[in-house]
Image (spheres, helix red, strand yellow):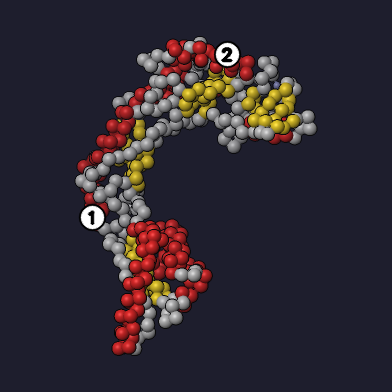
Amino acid sequence: MLIFKGRDFHIRILLPTDSQLKNARIECGWQLKKILHGYRHILKQRLHSCPDLVSFVVELKTILEIALKNTQELHVPRPPEYYSCLVRDLEILGWNKVAYVDAGLTTIKLKAEDSRGRQHLVTLRLNAKGGSWDLFVCLLKQGFLNCFLVLAVYAIAAQLLQYLLVCHCLHWKCCIGLKEATSQYPTEPPDCIVDFPVQFAISWMPQDSLVTIHNQFLAALESLKEFWDTMDEIDGKTWVLEPENPARGATARRIAIGSNVSVNVEVDPRHPKMLPECYFLGADHVVNPLRTKLNNNMHLWDPEISLLQNLKDLLEIDFPSRAVLEKSDFTKDCGICYAYRLHGAVPDQVCDEPRCGQPFHQACLYEWLQGLPSSRQSFNVIFGECPYCNKPLTLKSSVKKP
Ligand SMILES: [Zn+2]
Ligand SMILES: [Zn+2]
């Protein structure tokens, strides 16, 4: 007999005298009965098909997981202490720092402002973590069943005596405790979801509360201040083509340099003032000189000044200003599908002919070239001609996406 602490579901699998699994009966409490109600035929079928108890228990676990997912409202309510503890912690923290609380007190959003006045949110999920059920199945798999069965044999022997005495049906029982969804708060921290470019791991002591999380959140915001300053400057002073609406956690920006020319920079959130990873997009005759300048001027990089200013100095360019030009000046449509965005992708291939310079989606151009009898393919490289000016061009089937 195995019983777990906390709120448990109990399942009893009653095996008949012949120990045939297919004739076994399953008994359980009303809550579990309700959860498994729609799955009775599946359980019956599994009892028939499973060769032994272990495989049935594994199947049962899967069925139960699905059933639990589909019956949200059947989660056992948490003990009253959980709510009183949480409300008390929210009051200590101050309701002005709370952006959202759901009705069941399972999702809480806390807000905070960094020293630059940027607003940030941390979402706390006080849902269940993987419970002792997983541990049980794990133990079963690791041979724990062996001793379990020995115990069961003893149980049979003991119950045989009982049978002889009181003429009951012989069955051996196993009682499995299934730990139900219980939050570990405040013993364990809730899951914290943040919009950060780095992981947000909180250190937690059993006496800690929401105030601890909020303080650690504030400290993390300060540690990322320089990164967000860097990104804010790029977003504010240049035309960022990708991502469309950068999240606080986004470390890459594709900055427009000119018509069909852009540079994708990947900023290190921990060292935002260091030279970022740069990847140029555009026709070779425009992009190659920029690459050369970047390589030749790399020694000029000055960590004391901003990343954007450094990029300007190294590339010897001025990024097109947001004040003078429109974003549409840089977002030229694909020459094949006549759209800018195709399944989230933007045109990232450009004809190298200076007088043409037509942009294409990689997928569109690949499909186009494949359909032409004049194209030639070698491994993953396709050789063909620009659909606009017939200049020879080569295309890899998988091109590095910015
Ligand atoms: Zn296209
Ligand atoms: Zn062309």
Number of residues whose C-alpha sits closer than 10 Å to that of mark 2, classed few (under 14), some (14–19) or many (20 or more): few
Q: Find residue 289 and name its label.
A: 2
- Which amino acid type corresponds to the residue marked 1 in the rendered image? Glu
Of the 4 image quadrants, the one containing the N terminus is bottom left
Q: Find residue 271 and name its label.
A: none
For the point 33% across and 80% down, which residue is it?
A: 157
In the picture, residue 32 is in which quadrant? bottom left
Name the spot of residue 371 as percent of width and height, x first: 75, 35
For the point 34% across and 56% down, which residue is it?
A: 131
Kind of element beneath mark 1: helix
Viewer-proximal residue among 185 and 103: 185
Q: Is residue 341 left or right of residue 68?
A: right
Nearest to N terminus: mark 2 or mark 1: 1
**58 shown above or below 400:** below
Name the spot of residue 291 as percent of width and height, x first: 55, 16
For the point 51% across and 15% down, which residue is it?
A: 295
Query: Mark 2 and mark 1: span between their CA atoms?
Result: 67 Å
Kind of element beneath mark 2: helix
**127 shown above or below 245:** below
Number of residues whose C-alpha sits closer than 10 Å to that of mark 1, classed few (under 14), some (14–19) or many (20 or more): few
Q: Is residue 91 left or right of residue 253?
A: left
Q: Is residue 75 visible?
A: no
For the point 48% across and 24% down, which residue is it?
A: 277
Q: Is residue 45 left or right of residue 304?
A: right
Ligand 2 rendered quadrant: top right
**357 shown above or below 29:** above
Residue identified by numbered label 1: 81
Name the spot of residue 70 as percent of width and height, x first: 45, 59
